[in-house]
Image (cartoon, grey):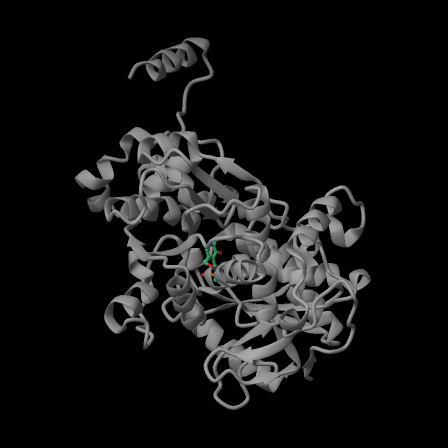
Amino acid sequence: MALDSTSHAAPEVAEFRFRCIACGAISSSAGQDFRCASCRDLLDIVYPTWKQASPDPARLKSLWRQRRMSLDTADLSGVWRFRELLPNAHANEIVTLREGNTPLYELPQCARSTGVPRLFAKHQGMNPTGSFKDTGMTVAATFARQAGFRWVACASTGNTSASMAAYAARGGLRSLVLVPEGKISWSKLSQALDYGAVTCQLRTDFDGCLRLLQELVLRAPVYQLNSINPFRLEGQKTLAIELLEQMDWQPPDHIIVPGGNLGNSSAIGKALLELRDLGLIARLPRLSVIQAEGANALVRTLRETAGQKLVSVSPETRATAIRIGNPASWKKAAHVIEATHGACEQVSEIEIAQAKAEIGAEGIGCEPASAVTLAGLKKLIQRGFVKRDESVVLVLTGNLLKDPDYTIEFHRGELFPSSDERSSDSRSLDSLRRPPIVLDAALDAILRTLDKAEKP
Ligand code: F0G
């Protein structure tokens, strides 16, 4: 089944084409593997009509603002509200859970501790299924249904599967989930089950799941909803559009994002470049990508091959969402880091745990993969890449409740192997730990605990 780009044109939304990121070949349809028919590289979505009649920036900004008052289904979505910059879908056919519309928070305590006063968090964990994946899934699920597929499928470290299962259910589609056995959090697995997905726990890692999915889509009429699917990335672009609208179109100096399969950084970067080219922003923020030390394929690719050849790694990290060794969108991510003059860094497990507790102490919370952003910021400040008078936005990709085991183990001092827990690095985390206290049901015991908690 081909995915046609020309049907369903509507005046309000953009005509699009697929373009190969390597050879530049343009096509109006894509095969089920979403790879270039001639050179097999990944596809991007482009909007040729913008060249002839580029949308008017002032008109777009005011239209998007007006839509925030509207009760129309498409306008209530924080993704489809920006539909002029998305592929054309009929407004009455979209599959939506009112995704997007996520808050931009100040982080006053982290601002003080890092010495960067203008520090913000764009919290994508406040999406309907608790992660940024929903912004891409609404677009890709809409096109899956429009193309007449009955089944959608993904490989996942947990969040994609939770999101896909929800949107499939809303859109009347069946869903197939491939996840690495034992390496995703129970919360994410439980979401996929609850939303009715056929869920397979495979005895491999995420990269193994993705490899099998790529073979599956060539053999069976299932529509793949991994971020190789360029419709996903178009939806995920809206994170950047909404963020800039929230900042009154004054770009921050830096945007910092976690890197796993590297779809999200690619999408945010694509949005920034498009917004600049369309005249909606006057200058580009620098986009930086942070990985866990144990899953640092992009860091190594940029350092060891100057971004020319992927260095795959055997991934290991407790931030299971980004436990990926062979990221599919590495070329796209390398391109946007270069184009925005961003950076790529890696952070240790202890640095991730500390950053997560610090974000939690702001009353916001996030899952471990999201906390790499704050840990990475500290490194970028040390390197002199981020200056203290610059403004910084951290993209928090997942909700705190996505991985409660991690949080509980951290506070109980059980997150790392016992030898590591006794190390001086781990002991430095003690002031952040708040283990649950088991007491007799007696007022005295509670008063004594209160008293102790008051003492420094
Ligand atoms: N943060 C969270 C919470 C994630 O779930 C993911 C990816 C990332 C960051 C990294 O984003 O892959 O676009 O670079 N999770 C995918 C999944 C792989 O299957 O849920 P990326």
The x and y percentages for residue 229 are 57, 72
The x and y percentages for residue 421 are 24, 41
Residue plotted at (58% across, 83% down) = 26
Q: Is residue 70 left or right of residue 319?
A: right
* Above or below 53: residue 65: above
Image quadrant occupied by the N terminus: bottom right
Q: How many marks?
A: 0
Q: Is residue 365 left or right of residue 347?
A: right
The x and y percentages for residue 169 are 71, 60
* Above or below 77: residue 311: below
Q: In the rendered image, is residue 26 in sight? A: yes
Residue plotted at (59% across, 64% down) = 234
Q: Front-most of 60 and 237?
A: 60
The x and y percentages for residue 322 are 41, 59
Residue plotted at (75% across, 61% down) = 94
Q: In the rendered image, is residue 416 in sight? A: no
Q: Is residue 44 left or right of residue 317?
A: right
Q: Front-most of 146 and 295?
A: 146
Residue plotted at (33% across, 67% down) = 297
Q: Front-most of 392 and 31?
A: 392
Q: Front-most of 209 and 362?
A: 362
Image quadrant occupied by the C terminus: top left
* Above or below 240: residue 108: above
In the image, farthest residue toward the left: 424
Please identify the quarter of the rendering in which residue 354 is found. top left
Q: Is residue 316 left or right of residue 76?
A: left
* Above or below 139: residue 282: above
